[in-house]
Image (cartoon, helix red, strand yellow):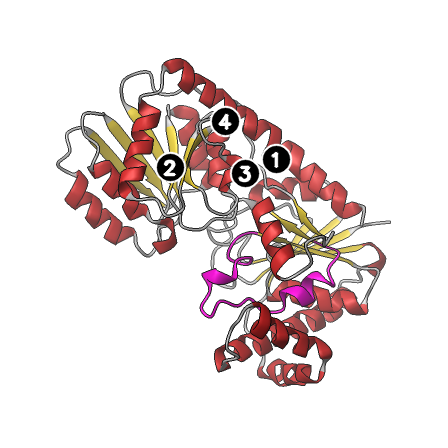
Amino acid sequence: MASTLIIFTEAFPFGQTETYLENEFPFLLNSFDRIFVVSINTSGEQTRKLPDRVKVIRKPYNTPYGYILRALFFVSKSEFWEEIRFIRKKLCLTLSIDVLRILISSYGKALEVSDWLDRFIIDEKIDKNNLYLYSYWLNNVSTGLALYKEKNHKVKAFCRTHGWDVYYELHKPAYLPLRSYTLSRLDACFCISEFGQDYLRNLVGRPTQNNVLVSYLGTNNPIGLRGGSKNSKIVLVSCSHVYLMKRIQIIIEALARINLIELEWFHFGDGPLMEANKALAKKLLDNKANLKYHFKGHVLNKEVLDFYRNNSVDLFITVSGSEGLPVSIMEANSFGIPALATNVGGNSEIVKDEINGLLLDPNCSINDVVKAIKRYYYLSENEKSQMRNNAYNNWNDRFNADKNYPAFIKTVLEF
């Protein structure tokens, strides 16, 4: 019997985000007979080429007014009042207009997704008995899948969850709608870190909830371990969007305080604070004889990997204030590059302090970053070599795409 997968994304295969889905998609292609990708990106150019047998649908993320009116009838259901009690008692939030607006609009979007699926599945003549619905995020779409699953029990419905879609405190107000409602109706929610799993189970589910699972993402590296720089210089790489939470300015200010050590720093990524960070770097770093730095801007993921293949890098650095579990660290580790990272989100699941990298306090100071960079620099060559081997082995054991994605798909197909 032919199997069908409908996967909902924020952008993929359009635009520049969700690059980590590129590693997973080949395994999905090998596991399902028919695949539909439903992207809410309606304007970006297609940046990822997919086989002809994959049908791509662009669906706008704007809920018609009629669905908001229908969502108002949600107040007559016990699930609405359960959510209200959760908001007031568990989250200790005031039941403000903003919170109610988020709740109602989320349910309206979920209704729209569920109705759209009804029509789409009929139009495409899809057999519901072998249908898998996959939201790449725990968002309003995944709530829509939960609603559809409630009406069509034979359909398999699941989602992944990463960072912004998990942690309530990253939002203002500190609220993410209908998570408990959604989790109780999906077949599974796959968290990309144990930290995220514990957070979800304890806040919005049950500590023992067995459909909130961990499934690590993974990366590819066919060439394996590379060596570090062979001279007294230390080469650092950071790779992230440039916005407030990533705290790139801390890296700049830390490098400004390091003297007598030859440094070269490459940053890959762009964002709203890029110009401000470039200006800060020009002010603090341009006159330092011991330092070279390069803002590479947004590049394709392939170019980052090519950089690792063709250059000796000593240390990957991230001082982000919040994380899921960074694919950027997986990629660095796969080339034997240790990571210096803040102990936030799932970072401690990939970076083991003094083993395959160095962990910093989440609220680390600039001087803490300076000390950590120096700590790595003054390790013996044997210690650095061991840390590099540990980084590679950790990636190969736990974050290798060739191992993680087949295991993920096997779990899905056994629902």
- Label 3, secondary structure: give it: helix
Percent across and percent down for residue 196 are 58, 50
| Contact, mark 3 vs mark 1 (Cβ under 8 Å) | no
Q: What residue type is labelled 2?
A: Ile
The residue under the point 15% across, 45% down is 283
| Contact, mark 1 vs mark 4 (Cβ under 8 Å) | no
Q: Mark 3 and mark 1: span between their CA atoms?
A: 17 Å
Q: Mark 2 and mark 3: span between their CA atoms?
A: 16 Å
Q: What residue type is labelled 3?
A: Glu
- Residue highlighted by disc 4: 391
Q: Which amino acid does label 1 sit on?
A: Ala
- Horizontal side of 273 relative to 351 (left or right) equals left
**Mark 1 or mark 2, earlier in chain:** 2
- Horizontal side of 286 relative to 307 (left or right) equals left
- Label 1, secondary structure: give it: helix
Give residue 287's quadrant in the image: top left
- Label 2, secondary structure: give it: strand
Report crowding for label 3: few under 14, some 14 to 19, many 20 or more residues within 10 A (C-alpha): some
Task: Identify the mark at residue 317; answer none if there is no mark.
Answer: 2
**Mark 1 or mark 4, earlier in chain:** 4
The residue under the point 38% across, 30% down is 315
